[in-house]
Amino acid sequence: MNACIFCQIIAGKAPADILYRDEWVTVFRDAHPVAPVHILIVPNRHIPSVNELVPEDEALSGHLFSVAQKIARQEGVDQDGFRLMVNCGRGGGQTVFHLHMHLLAGRRFHLPF
Ligand code: DGP
């Protein structure tokens, strides 16, 4: 069995609150939310991190933003605003090594954080 929890969710073998799915990405709520809205936009293909993206993934990378825009509208947070975050590697705070974009909203965010 694939040990990657996000691969298991994408394959329907582990539970998640799935909001959207298409041929490239699956979108589900974060199990440990740090904001009232905390959603993960996850490529269906197992890519460990930003470090493993290749030039052929440029369309996929752009698609992550298109889906983020759509989900922000769907969640009603597009006008107030939201934060998109991609952690890369342990130093970047990544804990699940399957590339994903966080969509966070519903509270105020500041830098530095
Ligand atoms: P990161 O630290 O950027 O790798 O973020 C990983 C996120 O994934 C973190 O916010 C918690 C979330 N997460 C970890 N395991 C699960 C899970 O089994 N289900 C869901 N829905 N989210 C998970």
Image: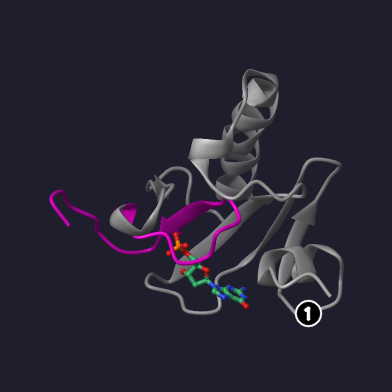
Q: Measured along the vertical axis of the image, is residue 13 above or below residue 101?
A: below
Residue at horizontal 76 percent and vertical 55 percent from the top: 20
Residue at horizontal 38 percent and vertical 70 percent from the top: 35
Residue at horizontal 55 percent and vertical 71 percent from the top: 30
Q: Position of residue 99 (x, y in %)?
A: 57, 50
Magenta stretch bounds: 92-113
Q: Measured along the vertical axis of the image, is residue 16 above or below residue 107?
A: below
From the image, tell me which residue sits under label 1: 14
Q: Is residue 16 left or right of residue 110?
A: right
Describe the element under mark 1 as helix, strand or loop. loop
Q: How is the rendered protein coloured?
A: one colour
Q: Position of residue 81 (x, y in %)?
A: 38, 46
Look at label 1 and name its amino acid. Ala
Q: Magenta stretch: residue 107 in it?
A: yes
Corner quadrant of residue 65: top right
Q: Residue furthest left?
A: 112
Q: Is residue 30 left or right of residue 8?
A: left
Q: Position of residue 53 (x, y in %)?
A: 59, 32
Q: Which quadrant holds the N terminus?
A: bottom right
Q: Is mark 1 within 8 Å of ligand 1?
A: yes
> Total label count?
1
Q: Nearer the viewer, residue 60 or 111?
A: 60
Q: Magenta stretch: residue 41 in it?
A: no
Q: Which quadrant holds the C terminus?
A: bottom left
Q: Measured along the vertical axis of the image, is residue 62 above or below residue 51?
A: above
Corner quadrant of residue 109: bottom left
Q: Residues within 10 Å of mark 1 (few under 14, many from 20)?
A: few
Residue at horizontal 68 percent and vertical 68 percent from the top: 4
Q: Nearer the viewer, residue 15 or 53?
A: 53
Q: Nearer the viewer, residue 45 or 1?
A: 1
Please identify the dominant SS of the magenta region.
loop
